[in-house]
Image (tube, helix red, strand yellow):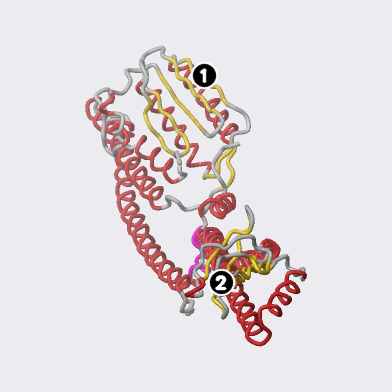
Amino acid sequence: MGHRLSPARRDADLTVRHSIFARITLLSAALSAVLLCGLWWVTDRTINETIAASLREGVDVDLAGLVDIHASGGREELSRRIADRLALVPSDGARAHYLLADATGARVAGDLAEWPGLDPAVSESGPVRIGRQTEAHARATLLPGNLRLLVAHEAPERAPILSRVALVFGLGGAVFVACIALFAQAAGGRVRQRVAGVNAAFRSGDDQALSALAATDSADEIDDIARQAARALQRDRQLMAAYRETSEQVAHEIRTPLSHLDARLAKALADDPAPATAAHLVAARGEIRQLVGTLEALLDIAASKAKQGQRQGMALVDLSAMTARICELYEDSAEDAGYALSWDIAPDVSLMGDEAQLGRILTNLLDNAFKYNRPGGAIRVVLAPGSRLSVADNGPGIAASERERVFERFWRGPSAQAGDQAGAGLGLALARAIAERHGLTLRVMPSEPGAHFMLAPEEG
């Protein structure tokens, strides 16, 4: 089978790799994830700052309460209250620490062994080290009677809080991103269906579908583009129809007098004229046939170029069977001309196209090989998987500077023989025009000796 993708496969490939809607879905999910990460960072900072503020407030409230106790109950009552508070075990694990010291710094009450570097004269606050690893927030103050009081609270364990918040963010964030992705996919899917419908209408070229697109009055951007494109295509079709009608009329007007002229020349030959006159009449009839053939070839080239990219009239063509059939038809002619015609055809090679036109490419290439081969030369036809067809001969070949010019209309190489149809320079031009209509390339490959033509799908 050939390797050209069907329209459905191309649409699927577009959806997977190049669809703007798939990109929008991925971008929406990515942006949602980034926003969630940013929100988590803000939440984490807020939780930490809230815990720190609560810790400072708790120390200040505890210190103020102890100051009031000292003011009302004195030193002994303050010592008892400090002992009571040290006996409490908080549920969150954030223990409180105290130090009541005299003017010399000697401990009067509390669990701290020494005074940290905080100035009680200004009620300084800040972090202090409790033991080797525990850090707490503390505030110091002076009490009447040359007493110093320090209150320190350990920070509550943050891991449980943060883990619960992280769990909520993880589950909620996953649901949020999934909802955003599903919404974007659903919205993109609806738009994709509309775009696919527009593409199908343009690909099929159905006049009714194009008329429906051109007549739509929806105001969104997709319909506006489809409407303008459909109208442009309709105008193009009208111009092409007028061009074809004019071309066919001109061709008819030319063929008719030429046919009458050929009939008159045939009558003149039937009257048994002199040999010299008969020779001129035969040559004139040959030129008429060549002129008619040239006119038909030009019309075929124009029609093929006009239909380039269109899929109407195309079906799955068995290239293997078609190539074998044409080679067998040319086998007797090759034997009569003294050429060794051989072919190597891979089985089951197929291609979407117009079988008659694809056959015309091969017959034109074989005709070219027959006309410009050396006496007793060989002609080799190879059809390989991937719809790659080559025709090679043992003729004089084609110079590197002429490998593109041979496909120009009316161009004749140095080896062209006067009077043959190939000398009109349209056979290869028509073959390339048909190839381009089918999304194929026809080019001359480097070869020595002889000419080597390769027909293959366009790359990319």
Query: In the rendered image, which residue does mark 1 sit on?
Result: 342
- Say which of 234 and 42 sits in front: 42
Side of 52 relative to 405 (left or right): right
Side of 136 relative to 219 (left or right): right
| Quadrant occupied by the N terminus | top right
- Say which of 33 and 5 sits in front: 33
| Amino acid type indicated by mark 2 | Arg
Residue 170: percent from left, percent from top: 66, 62
Q: Earlier in the sequence, mark 1 or mark 2?
A: 2
Query: In the rendered image, which residue does mark 2 sit on?
Result: 139
Quadrant assignment, res 69: bottom right
- Mark yes or no: residue 378 visible: yes
In magenta, the rendered stretch is 202-210
Side of 55 relative to 371 (left or right): right
Q: Tell me the distance, in whole angstroms, between the alpha carbons under discs 1 and 2.
A: 103 Å
Secondary structure at badge 2 equals strand
| Amino acid type indicated by mark 1 | Ser
